[in-house]
Image (cartoon, rainbow, N blue to C red):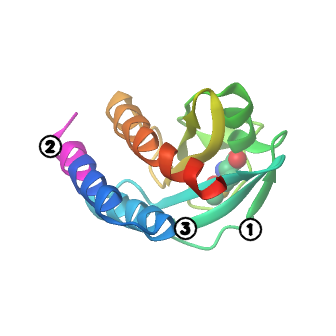
């Protein structure tokens, strides 16, 4: 990972482990990601509730997509496929649900524990093809940090 990605990971790990309130830990996560990584124009966390992804803490313009059924959008595809999805050009992807007119690329990382999806990290960029292997590694590691916390929210 680049120094920027490493710094973001360390900052998020420190915030998540020291913050006992899970909502505040999620809020710190999206704040720190957008602060450390300038290409991250919008960052949010969706929580799976029944068959819908519900928008939790986010940074950036308010999204019209606050509840996304599992069968819809790139968000729905990442949750049902249980895998990270990177879209280099959102306008070329028929699954795309638009959040902002400026968005060009997107990465969605499922937050999973023991094979069950609990939520997702969703990052948008105003730059085409802004996300690569470094971003996937960073966000998958953060998803692993958040997973037990999201699971505890449901317990
Ligand atoms: N673009 C996502 C919807 C979420 S907004 O970008 C915040 C999708 O296609 O599922």
The quadrant where residue 15 appears: bottom left
Task: Compare residues 48 and 73 and report the one nearer the observer.
Answer: 48
Magenta range is: 1-8
Q: Magenta region's main secondary structure?
A: helix
Q: Mark 1–mark 2 contact, CB under 8 Å? A: no
Mark 3 near ligand 1 (CB under 8 Å)? no
Residue at screen point 49% across, 45% down: 148
Give the secondary structure at mark 1.
loop
Q: Which of marks 3 and 2 is nearer the N terminus?
A: 2
Residue at screen point 58% across, 28% down: 114
The residue mark sitting in front, 1 or 3, is 3
Pointer 3: what residue?
57
Whether residue 69 sits left or right of residue 91 in the image: it is right
Separation of disc 1 and disc 3 at Cα? Answer: 14 Å
Separation of disc 3 and disc 2 at Cα? Answer: 26 Å
Pointer 1: what residue?
64
Pointer 2: what residue?
3
Q: Position of residue 58 (x, y in %)?
A: 53, 67
Number of the label disc, if any, that sits on residue 98: none
Give the secondary structure at mark 2.
helix
Q: Which of marks 1 and 3 is nearer the N terminus?
A: 3
The residue mark sitting in front, 3 or 2, is 3
Mark 2 near ligand 1 (CB under 8 Å)? no
């Amino acid at each position: 990972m680049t120094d920027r990605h490493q710094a973001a990971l360390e900052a998020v790990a420190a915030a998540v482990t020291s913050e006992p309130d899970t909502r505040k830990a999620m809020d710190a996560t999206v704040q720190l990601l957008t602060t450390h990584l300038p290409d991250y124009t919008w960052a949010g966390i969706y929580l799976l509730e029944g068959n819908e992804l519900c928008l939790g803490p986010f940074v950036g313009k308010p999204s019209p997509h606050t509840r996304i059924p599992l069968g819809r959008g790139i968000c729905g595809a990442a949750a049902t496929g249980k895998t990270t999805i990177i879209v280099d050009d959102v306008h070329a992807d028929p699954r795309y649900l638009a959040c902002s007119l400026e968005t060009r690329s997107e990465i969605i990382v499922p937050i999973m524990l023991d094979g069950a999806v609990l939520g997702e990290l969703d990052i948008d960029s105003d730059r085409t093809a802004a996300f690569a292997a470094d971003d996937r590694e960073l966000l998958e590691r953060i998803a692993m940090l958040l997973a037990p916390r999201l699971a505890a929210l449901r317990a």
